[in-house]
Image: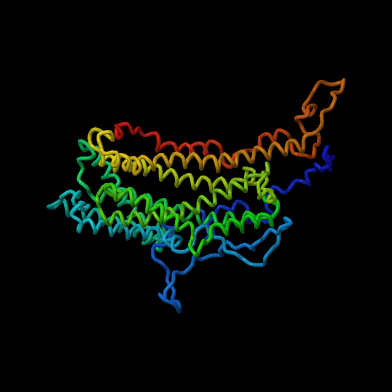
Amino acid sequence: MGESDATGETTGREHWRADRPADDELLGSLWIRWTDGGSDMHLHRICEIVPQLTRTDTFPFLAIKPESGNRPTFERVERDSDGTYRETGAEAQFAFIDGIPRQLLRHAPLVIAVATALLVAGAWLDPSVGPVTDLFPSIAGPDAGLFALYLAITPVLVWLLSMVDVVEYREFPSALAIYGLVGALVAGVGMSVFLTVTADHPSAIEPNVVFVSGYLLLLLVAGQFLYEATLRIEHLFVTLGARSNDIVGDELAYRHFLTDLHDSLRLRVYGLSPSRVFGVLVAAQFAIIWLIGNGPQELDYGLGLLVNASLNAILGTAAFQFLVVVRYFNRLLNASGEYSDVELTYEPFHVDGYGGFRDLGRFAIRINMILTMAGLYLVYRLYVVGGRAIPRGGVMAIGDPLSTAVWLISFVGPVVGYALGAGAWGYYSFWSMHAKMVRDKHRIARKYQGTAREVDNDRTPAAGDRIESFDDSEGPAWAALQAAPTWPLEVNKMASLLSSNVLPLLFPVSNVLF
């Protein structure tokens, strides 16, 4: 047994909180989808393409079946005026986002496929925008037949692979639909970039519906990533408090935190959801700017404006919910805040290798990936779309102050907003976790270090003679504690992922602005 320190606290190793969960099956399983327990990132396995419907007794007599699996559920805990925690006996299903916005995220491929079909078909009816077929090369004669034969062979090859289970037959239709849509939109992005690069000036390019490809591609890929992250976030936050003897010291206090977070995510004011009102108002702001200007993709395309505004309302709703989660997460990390009773504590020898914060770090990385996708699209939009809206003389040649302001708000403003948002996310996630881990590591060192001892006359000074070392051999070795990580993920990997946020900002914009 260890000796007591100056504060009277026992320092023996057995009095440390356990550095691993009691149930080994939970090891490393926080950052998974609660629907299937999976952790792979295949796009065709994330969302559902066709809604699974069930009959109901009320109008409209049909409803979408909920996701399969055990929904993350917790028992609500309230805090009384005297500071004690009380279980209410009521269970709550924790959901990052719910209702129609959730169903749209859940069926993101179908939503984007419908939006793509509407915009492509509408271009044939709207004389102000050219249809995508205007960009198709004319192929005639025997070469056209040979090329068609080449394309027809591809699905046969995939079918043959599926017969021997190299490609799973049951997943083939969904994979073909999703990756086919991704391929078509990538081709559209490539064509729009090609048109911009090869033109004498972007303003000389004829309006064509192909310029909506970048926006739709972002929503298709990032939307699926966001839905998959939603399933993982819900599992992460609920399971984190359910694991005993882990980094959460007080389960009741944690469930009180979870109760507050749950109530904020599902808040209603005068019967309205603030997140949905926020999303509608954000979309309305952009719609106003687009009405003053020439539409979201500079196409003067009414249907395009309507589709963009509708999808932006969903994005705004998800962004609002995300900000709520970030705010509560930051308050949880604050040891002196209102949720300090949770005792979220860094465990230097946790089995995950990152002080128990690895899965929280994975959550931060996923959001960082989505931010990077958004940043790349915004720079693409600045060059490819925004460049078509300014004359050869640059922004200063627009002349009209209102038109100049609209251009800056529409194209430069989102890039600046991305830079601020990415920086804020890096601070409130990675840096906040790092600061928390460092503080707790220093606290542990102070708690378990020994007292200064006089050096015996018959030997030279050695390790253990200074106050910086441990006096108790039963405690963790000083070198091991010093080597314990203070970042939630491997430093080099995390640095490379964080640096990806800067990539969209490295493209020079002087040739567009001036």
- Where does the C terminus fall, quadrant-wise? top left
Indicate the position of residue 454 as horizontal and vertical percent values. 85, 24
Q: Is residue 215 above or below residue 162?
A: above
Residue furthest out toward the bottom:
57
Q: Quadrant of residue 468?
A: top right
In the rendered view, does 134 fall on the left or right side of 361? left
Indicate the position of residue 383 as horizontal and vertical percent values. 31, 39
Q: Nearer the viewer, residue 504 or 179?
A: 504
Residue at left offset 49%, top offset 39%: 423
Indicate the position of residue 36 as horizontal and vertical percent values. 52, 61
In the rendered view, does 423 fall on the left or right side of 255? left
- Where does the N terminus fall, quadrant-wise? top right
Residue furthest out toward the right:
457
The answer to whether residue 409 is seen in the rendering is yes
Q: Is residue 506 above or below residue 261?
A: above
Q: Nearer the viewer, residue 274 or 331?
A: 274
In the rendered view, does 466 fall on the left or right side of 355? right
Q: Quadrant of residue 64?
A: bottom left
Which color scheme does this rendered protein use? rainbow
Residue furthest out toward the left:
141
Q: Quadrant of residue 374?
A: top left
The answer to whether residue 187 is seen in the rendering is no
In the rendered view, does 23 fall on the left or right side of 166? right
Number of numbered markers: 0
Indicate the position of residue 325 as horizontal and vertical percent values. 54, 51
Q: Nearer the viewer, residue 79 or 143?
A: 79
